[in-house]
């Protein structure tokens, strides 16, 4: 039996040597897990920051799309106002022609030498960029045609 006692003693001594080494490995694994958890917390904070930035970017995109829709409606309003401006300029020219024909009426309220110009022409004269709106063709609007004097027969002074 001494052989069994030796085996038992050897097994016991190996077990006693193995116990501290397994604890050491377990502690290293535990330390590594703690480091990983700490780095995961840092990643979580960074992802939160990125998420906040994306939320702000989303809000900015929403605001920009709203502004784009408003700009589109303003462009349609601008084109409408440009056509009204052109119409009013032609009306003013017509009134000036009537004033020059019948000077004592003074319908237009303008001085005779005053230059009639649209808002676009004034902006171009002041150095602004020319409008991207298409120019109206003369004769397209009946109000733009110059007023002609009515043909009346000359009365005989006789």
Image (cartoon, rainbow, N blue to C red):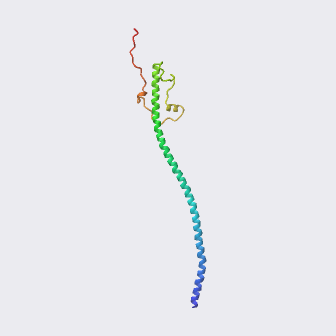
Q: Residue furthest left?
A: 153
Residue drawn 51% across the image and 46% down it: 63
Residue drawn 45% across the image and 27% down it: 91
Q: Residue furthest top?
A: 158
Location of residue 47 (image quadrant): bottom right
| Residue 117, percent from left and from top | 49, 28
| Residue 141, percent from left and from top | 41, 29
Q: Is residue 13 above or below residue 123?
A: below
Could you tell whether 148 is left or right of 60 in the image?
left
The answer to whether residue 95 is seen in the rendering is yes
Quadrant where the N terminus sits is bottom right
64 vs 2, nearest the viewer? 64
Quadrant where the C terminus sits is top left
Residue drawn 60% across the image and 76% down it: 21
| Residue 107, percent from left and from top | 47, 22
The answer to whether residue 133 is seen in the rendering is no
| Residue 79, percent from left and from top | 46, 36
Q: Is residue 117 above or below residue 1?
A: above
53 vs 109, nearest the viewer? 109
* Number of callouts: 0
Q: Residue furthest bottom?
A: 1
Residue drawn 57% across the image and 89% down it: 3
């Amino acid at each position: 039996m001494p052989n069994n006692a030796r085996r038992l003693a050897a097994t016991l001594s190996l077990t006693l040597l193995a116990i501290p080494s397994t604890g050491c490995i377990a502690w290293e694994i535990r330390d590594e897990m703690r480091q990983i958890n700490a780095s995961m917390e840092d990643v979580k904070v960074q992802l939160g920051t990125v998420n906040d930035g994306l939320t702000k970017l989303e809000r900015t995109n929403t605001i920009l799309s709203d502004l784009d829709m408003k700009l589109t409606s303003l462009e349609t309003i601008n084109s409408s106002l440009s056509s009204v401006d052109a119409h009013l300029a032609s009306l003013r020219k017509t009134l000036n022609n009537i004033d020059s024909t019948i000077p004592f009426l003074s319908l237009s309220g303008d001085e005779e030498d005053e230059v009639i110009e649209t808002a676009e022409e004034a902006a171009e004269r002041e150095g602004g960029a020319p409008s991207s709106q298409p120019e109206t063709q003369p004769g397209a609007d009946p109000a733009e045609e110059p007023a002609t004097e009515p043909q009346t027969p000359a009365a005989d002074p006789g």
